[in-house]
Image (tube, grey):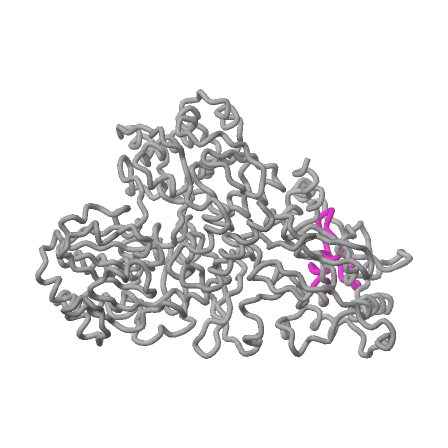
Amino acid sequence: MLRHLARRAVDLTGAGRHRIYSTAAANDKKIEVFVDNIRVLVDPGTTVLQACAAAGVQIPRFCYHDRLSVAGNCRMCLVEIEKNPKPQASCAMPVMNGMRVKTDSKVTKKAQEGVMEFLLVNHPLDCPICDQGGECDLQDQSMAFGSDRSRFTDIAFSGKRAVEDKNIGPLVKTIMTRCIHCTRCIRFGSEIAGVDDLGTTGRGADMQVGTYIEKMFRSELSGNVIDLCPVGALTSKPYAFTARPWELRKTESIDVLDAIGSNIIINTRCDEVMRILPRLNEDINEEWIADKTRFAYDGLKRQRLTVPMVKDSRGQLRQAVWEEALMAVASKIAQCQSDKIAAVVGGLVDVESLVALKDMLNRFGSDNLYTEESFPTEGAGLDLRSNYLFNSSISGVENADLLLLVGTNPRFEAPLVNARIRKSFIHNDLKVALIGPKVDLTYEYQHLGDSTKVLDEIATGRHPFSKEFANAKRPIIVVGSTSLQRPDSVAILSSASTIACSVAKPAQADWKVLNVLHRVASQVGALDAGYKPGVGNLRNAQLIYLLGADAGVVTREQLPSDCFVVYQGHHGDKGAYMADVILPGAAYTEKTATYINTEGRAQQTLRAITPPGMAREDWKIIRALSEVAGKTLPYEELWELRQRMYDISPTLVRYGELEPANFFTLAQKLMKSTKTRLSSEPLDVELKELQQYYMTDSISRSSQTMAKCVAAVKADKAKNKY
């Protein structure tokens, strides 16, 4: 019932338009419309506002948004339509053949000026102190479409309307007196985020937007309402009163705090990150970003490693110069046997550093290169890229009609993938099933239990759900990387591969069924570069090189007492505590670097600020160490290193391109040759609740804002007894 109500509400959204009117579009039945005497041909069902946009005419709007349902309540988009007695709301009015729209007539201008005048009657004069100043839709549209004078004289009587501010958490600041009731935030919460915390109470002048009762806006996507709000009613609480938009330098980059690779804009001032905003990319994150991406930037300036450090004779780390630190590491490498040197890389490492570290250790005769995240290597293992990628692509989720989630909670492991799933659930009647713990995914799903037996029964056709898989036209399976950390990971991946091959349709050779959802940004790049997943046996290691390894997978207790530990990274986190030498590296905002997201798409960060203190880019540190150690790597510039990456795999430098993976049938046959059994232990996930989402890596663990979020969720949970 809820799904059908939601579908009716979003029938005219940008996401649903193409699907609803696809039949008419396929028949090429175009409608002729005249916008200011400009002839335009549009599809049936197109709104007047969209027809005007096709003609190159801008119509002012506050409530309308391409990705949200049509509300039609701000009335700013009123236009004159010939033969209509009064102006019409263009966002909600479908076009008719021969319709003539006048956007620059006296009637249209008077209507728009009148609506703007009513909006400004109760809007406070906060522009000089408002964080939205300089990028405010109300400012821009009042200048372009409003009147040139004010007739407001009621200040001596009732005055302007005032509303009490709401406390909805540590991320979004509310100044509700500025609210113009566009309801964008409410529609975003209900339709995109799947959290019905926001709503309206009262009518007319007493109408208010809020959370009904005082509570936190409990969503991992809550920060997007800041971008959606056309006025200064909802602004960023951590960013409040810190900068003006015209002071900021904008750098296009990507996020690395999960494996999605959301496109972002980093705003900086005086070599400091001031805020992070989303950047449009229809294939990955659309125009949304997760809260950790948006607000964890304050962790970039706390707990930072800024100088090299070397442990002295008393076992205490002391500051050193680069030459001393590099000589200490190089001399120790010279004393070690080649097979007793190992490296472990973490989840935030870029491909350039991965390739440089691998080349250096290979020159010393060592091939002990590991990632913190594990992955099954039996059968086809890592030889076939299709085994470890999100093969359907992130945007491809919208084309699926059946989805099986295995041992994953995409809401917190990959919030933007979960938003895509919810979008397809609402618009396309996507049916979702889950094998794993019962969690809140923000949409309805069929819970098949948490036993691995269910996976085996579906693979062998003995489960009732097998019939639904067989009848589906475009099914997909998403296996979470959490479930592939288990001892029976080979059997889990083999069963998923068997299901995928059994339901694959020969007529749809381009449709990929099997997908792996990774949690960390570096994993796919490391597997592409030739690293071994999971930490191997380090009992006999004489030297361990930890490159950003902060997940706590490697502990001092695992290592011999005389093992020499080198830590290279940007934060003083778990890996730095056990180090004999610390080499300070650069964070993702401080370097131009390559990352491969979970679907295998190469993207790059761009340097927005300089590394603090004596910190340097990671691949340059490794290059300098190789020279000091007498095994100089053959590249000095970034383009030379990227040529080396191209030699390893051309996909590593084809930025923005998605190369489809193949050989699924071969991979499944090789998987069958492995003799492993599913464990009786139930499938589980690490991130089950919102409070566990905020602090999962060295940057977010150093963020005060993320710590406040964890405390706020716990307090809200205790207060409202969720």
In the rendered image, residue 536, in percent from the top left (x then y), is placed at: 22, 46
- Asked if the magenta segment contains residue 578, the reply would be no
Residue located farthest toward the right when viewing the structure as drawn: 85
Residue located farthest toward the top when viewing the structure as drawn: 462
Relative to 106, 131 lies left or right: left
Q: Quadrant of the C terminus?
A: top right
Of the pair 624 and 639, the residue shown nearer to us: 624
Picture quadrant of residue 564: bottom left
Q: How many marks?
A: 0
In the rendered image, residue 694, in percent from the top left (x then y), is placed at: 47, 55
- Looking at the picture, does residue 441 appear above or below residue 225? above
Relative to 484, 329 lies left or right: left
Q: Quadrant of the N terminus?
A: top right
What residue is drawn where x is 54% and y is 42%? Answer: 441
Picture quadrant of residue 679: top left
Of the pair 722 and 678, the residue shown nearer to us: 722
Of the pair 684 and 669, the residue shown nearer to us: 684
The residue stretch that appears in magenta? 34-61
In the rendered image, residue 387, in percent from the top left (x then y), is placed at: 35, 40
Of the pair 571 and 445, the residue shown nearer to us: 571
Relative to 48, 621 lies left or right: left
- Asked if the magenta segment contains residue 39, the reply would be yes
Relative to 234, 171 lies left or right: left
In the rendered image, residue 271, in percent from the top left (x then y), is placed at: 43, 76
